[in-house]
Image (cartoon, rainbow, N blue to C red):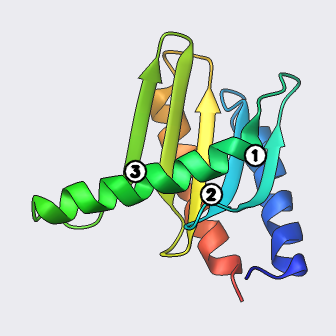
Amino acid sequence: MVSTQTIQNFEGRLIQLLSDCHAIDACVVATADGHFCAMKQRSTKYPLERLATMGSTLMSLGDTITAELQMGLCDNIISENKNGIVAFMHINNDLVLITLTIQKNALGMLLSHSRRCAEELSKMIV
């Protein structure tokens, strides 16, 4: 269980993520078992609560695939779509960061800023 204070810290860091990278349109922190912890997004409203469940499931599948192939742990999963990109990555064994952009040419920025954010979020866990 993530404490209320930790969730508030997460929300502050997600606000900073959106401020630091204008390409990112929304971000979510979810537990590995699919529960929503925190989210922030710009003016476009996405149904992010369901994304928590899907993101944790997708990361679990990625972990299973890479384990089967003996490639180590899955760092991230990228979904490139007609209207944007969604990135899923581990914060730690218990949490997942999900970020999205509608800019098709922003994959590098999305991954770079998301990785840095995930590292900082992992340090906030008490």
> Which residue bears the numbered disc 2?
117
Residue positioned most to the bottom: 126
> Which residue bears the numbered disc 3?
76
Q: Regarding mark 1 in the picture, which secondary structure is present there?
A: helix
Relative to the observer, which residue lies in front, 114 or 78?
78
Residue positioned most to the top: 82
Instruction: Please tell me how crowded label 3 is: few (under 14), some (14-19), or many (20+) other residues with Cα within 10 Å.
Output: some
- Under mark 2, the amino acid is Cys
Instruction: Please tell me how crowded label 2 is: few (under 14), some (14-19), or many (20+) other residues with Cα within 10 Å.
Output: some
Distance between mark 1 and mark 2 Cα atoms: 20 Å
Distance between mark 3 and mark 1 Cα atoms: 20 Å
- Mark in the foreground, 1 or 2: 1
Residue positioned most to the left: 69
Q: Earlier in the sequence, mark 1 or mark 2?
A: 1
Q: Regarding mark 2 in the picture, which secondary structure is present there?
A: helix
Disc ID at residue 49: 1
Quarter holding the N terminus?
bottom right
Q: Earlier in the sequence, mark 3 or mark 1?
A: 1
Q: Residue at x 43, y 55 (%)?
A: 59
> Is residue 71 visible to the viewer in this orientation of the structure?
no
